[in-house]
Image (tube, grey):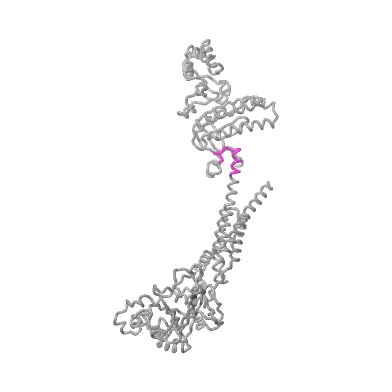
């Protein structure tokens, strides 16, 4: 037994290991070579769960929005009273004097820094006003440059660096940083550049966010920035309320909404496009829709200030993570064989993976390969569950097959599939069932002359054939009684006695085929007696809590056994009672042959017995027989005797005709005492 259990464990170990190893290798190759977009999206999920960096200084956004372009909220008088509003009314792009006015108002109000996210290539109206503003406040103003890609006639990509108009930078005070963001292949901005080498120059150009960080936190902090880094977008910069730019130039809104500039005091003020056609919006790893470009610069600045960067794993790390996760699922499967408990452990592992991923992102600045990790755990975990479910199903099937050798299939089904069944405890339930007894004639005498091994082999062959027929007919074998069989229909499910009668016919047909084989081998034929009765029984377990056996108990069982034994007296092979005939209804067996009305030992009430008509007896003889039986039971012995003698002559060897003919002669010679009821008495059990 120990070897068997060890073998089972070894087989399970191999099946689980093979499943997890295959899953791990397939996933490792898949994640190392592809699915980059899907992996990036799962990495974004960790970014969304992570706490967002918040800058230690205030931020304000001044938006060049649709209301600033259209000035729908300003009256003609208000526009005419403000040179900047008048310039804005002439249409976009605005005169650069508008930006000069905005810079002066914001910095005079106490703004710490102004970031002007507006590309200013080439000369334009108002350049002189902006140049003067930059000469005065340029050390607290950041302008933007851009890198642009052109395609030459030969198809070569040319990168051009575009600074603001040179006429604006004559003072040398203004700070400039490039405004470009580069998207990943799925269109999401996850990595921010902080420096970039322009063509033909060894000196890298800083980004706008890097320049702002240097002005606010010192040049050392700017110098320590990497050339580029994946970042967690700053929450404050994303959610900050935007003030439309036109409100800076209307005295009423400057006083009411801008608090005469107090809302900008000691803050970083970013001015940029917020109108719908600006095409300056980017999706980020933090989700939440598109972020305007000006807000993106502040989000990157917040990440740079707080060091909210992270590194992403390479292809080898992704593949290795998937493989190790699959192996971890295998270890869990070995440690926790209970499937429900294992599923709970897998769920806990997934939750820990998410929590660990966020922790690694925040504290270690590493973005774990979440999708390979989850895929390895889930795919391999599901694979182990499937393997064990299949193995458990096979084991249950094997156990069921073994159990069905000792207990009927319907009882096995009740025990295994319905654990709350009454069969799980001692006790029983009253049921109306059909009971069939089958017994080999003269088997005991035959057994005395046979070797035990040969006897057992022949008996098992016979019982195996009969059991299959009983099961096919919807019945169950309650027990074997040596060469006898006790079969039952209706213990757990409703059934008809016709099933038992059909079964008895098939049993006799199978025995006839078996006898042909036996006679061919020089062995004697076997004869079978079958008795069937339907009635109430007590069905349930007998025994103790250590050993229980489901069985049927009651007078119905005893009467079926007595009925089977009476076959010897009548020379029949099948006998059944009136309860069986009545349950058959319109079945073929309903037209059956009456045998006798008999009072068996131990019962006061007489029992009507029937058998099956031989096919060779024609219908007119069947009617004559039934009428003669009625005459006999009515005491008309002379009429009955003549009819039975005629039938006996027509059908030599018919034991029932011979039996009734003899009874009629005896009654004529010695008339029975009155009153005559036609009931015979069994002389033995």
- Comparing 409 with 24, the one in front is 24
Is 404 colored magenta in this rendering? yes
How many marks do you count on the picture? Answer: 0
**Left or right: 599 in relation to 94:** right
State the image quarter where residue 344 is shown: bottom right
Vertical placement of residue 101 versus 18, above or below: below
Residue 52 spot, x, y in % from top left: 49, 72
| Residue 352 lies in quadrant | bottom right
Q: Quadrant of the C terminus?
A: top right
Furthest-top residue in this view: 669
Q: Is residue 275 visible from the viewing direction of this image?
A: yes
Residue 49 versus residue 540: which sits nearer the camera? 49
Residue 124 drawn above or below residue 529: below
- Looking at this view, name the residue that lies furthest to the right: 451
Rendering coords of residue 450 (x, y %): 69, 28
Q: Magenta includes 405? A: yes
Residue 470 x %, y %? 56, 33
Looking at the image, residue 548 lies above or below residue 22: above
Q: Residue at x 60, y 38 (%)?
A: 405
Q: Is residue 676 visible?
A: no
In the image, the segment drawn in magenta is: 397-412
Q: Residue furthest front?
A: 154
Residue 312's spot in the image, x, y percent? 56, 69
Q: Decide which of 122, 505 is in the foreground and name it.
A: 122
Q: Residue at x 62, y 30 (%)?
A: 483
Main SS of the magenta part reads helix
Above-or-below relation of 250 to 608: below
């Amino acid at each position: 037994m120990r070897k068997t259990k060890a073998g089972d464990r070894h087989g399970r170990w191999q099946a689980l290991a093979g499943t997890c190893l295959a899953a791990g290798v397939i996933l490792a190759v898949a994640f190392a070579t592809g699915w980059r977009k899907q992996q990036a999206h799962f990495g974004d999920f960790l970014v969304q769960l992570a706490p967002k960096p918040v800058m230690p200084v205030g931020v304000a956004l001044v938006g060049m929005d649709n209301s600033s372009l259209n000035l729908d909220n300003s009256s003609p008088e208000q526009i005419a009273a403000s040179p900047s509003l008048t310039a804005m009314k002439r249409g976009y792009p605005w005169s650069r004097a508008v930006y000069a006015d905005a810079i002066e108002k914001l910095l005079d109000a106490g703004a710490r820094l102004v970031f002007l996210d507006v590309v200013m290539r080439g000369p334009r109206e108002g350049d002189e006003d902006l140049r003067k503003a930059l000469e005065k406040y340029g050390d607290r103003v950041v302008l933007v440059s851009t890198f642009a890609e052109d395609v030459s006639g030969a198809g070569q990509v040319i990168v051009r660096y575009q600074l603001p108009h040179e006429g604006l930078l004559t003072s040398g005070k203004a700070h400039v940083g490039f405004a470009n963001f580069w998207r990943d292949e799925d269109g999401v901005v996850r990595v921010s550049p902080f420096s970039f080498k322009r063509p033909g120059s060894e000196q890298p150009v800083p980004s706008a966010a890097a320049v702002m960080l240097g002005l606010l936190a010192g040049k050392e902090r700017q110098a320590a920035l990497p050339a580029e880094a994946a970042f967690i977008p700053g929450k404050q910069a994303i959610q900050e309320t935007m003030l439309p730019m036109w409100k800076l130039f209307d005295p009423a809104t400057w006083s009411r909404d801008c608090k005469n500039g107090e809302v900008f005091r000691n803050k970083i003020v970013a001015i940029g496009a917020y109108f719908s056609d600006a095409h300056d919006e980017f999706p980020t790893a933090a989700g939440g829709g598109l972020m305007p470009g000006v807000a993106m610069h502040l989000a990157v600045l917040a990440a740079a200030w707080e060091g909210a960067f992270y590194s992403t794993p390479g292809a080898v790390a992704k593949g290795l993570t998937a493989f190790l996760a699959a192996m971890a699922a295998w270890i869990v499967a070995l440690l926790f064989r209970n499937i429900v408990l294992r599923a709970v452990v897998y769920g806990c592992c997934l939750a820990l993976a998410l929590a660990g991923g966020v922790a690694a992102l925040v504290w270690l600045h590493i973005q774990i390969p979440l999708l390979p990790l989850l895929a390895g755990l889930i795919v391999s975990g599901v694979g182990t569950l499937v393997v064990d479910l299949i193995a458990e199903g096979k084991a249950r099937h094997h156990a069921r097959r073994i159990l069905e050798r000792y207990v009927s299939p319907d009882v096995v089904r009740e025990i295994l599939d319905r654990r709350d069944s009454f069969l799980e405890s001692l006790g029983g339930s009253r049921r109306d069932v059909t009971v069939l007894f089958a017994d080999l004639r003269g088997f005991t005498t035959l057994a005395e002359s046979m070797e035990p091994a040969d006897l057992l082999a022949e008996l098992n062959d016979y019982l195996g054939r009969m059991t299959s027929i009983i099961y096919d007919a919807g019945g169950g074998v309650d027990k074997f009684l040596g060469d006898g069989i006790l079969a039952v229909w209706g213990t757990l499910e409703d059934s008809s006695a016709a099933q038992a009668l059909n079964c008895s016919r098939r049993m006799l047909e199978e025995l006839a085929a078996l006898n042909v084989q036996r006679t061919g081998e020089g062995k004697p034929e076997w004869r079978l007696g079958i008795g069937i009765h339907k009635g109430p029984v007590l069905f349930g377990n007998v025994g103790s809590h250590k050993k229980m056996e489901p069985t049927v108990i009651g007078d119905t069982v005893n009467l079926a056994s007595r009925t089977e034994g009476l076959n010897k007296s009548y020379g029949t092979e099948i006998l059944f009672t009136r309860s069986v005939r009545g349950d058959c209804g319109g079945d073929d067996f309903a037209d059956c042959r009456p045998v006798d009305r008999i009072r068996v030992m131990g019962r006061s009430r007489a029992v009507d017995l029937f058998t099956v008509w031989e096919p060779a007896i024609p219908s007119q003889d069947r009617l004559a027989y039934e009428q003669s039986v009625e005459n006999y039971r009515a005491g008309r012995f002379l009429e009955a005797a003549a009819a039975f003698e005629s039938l006996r002559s027509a059908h030599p060897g018919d034991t029932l005709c011979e039996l009734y003919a003899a009874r009629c002669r005896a009654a004529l010679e010695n008339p029975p005492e009155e009153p005559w009821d036609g009931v015979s008495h069994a002389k033995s059990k």
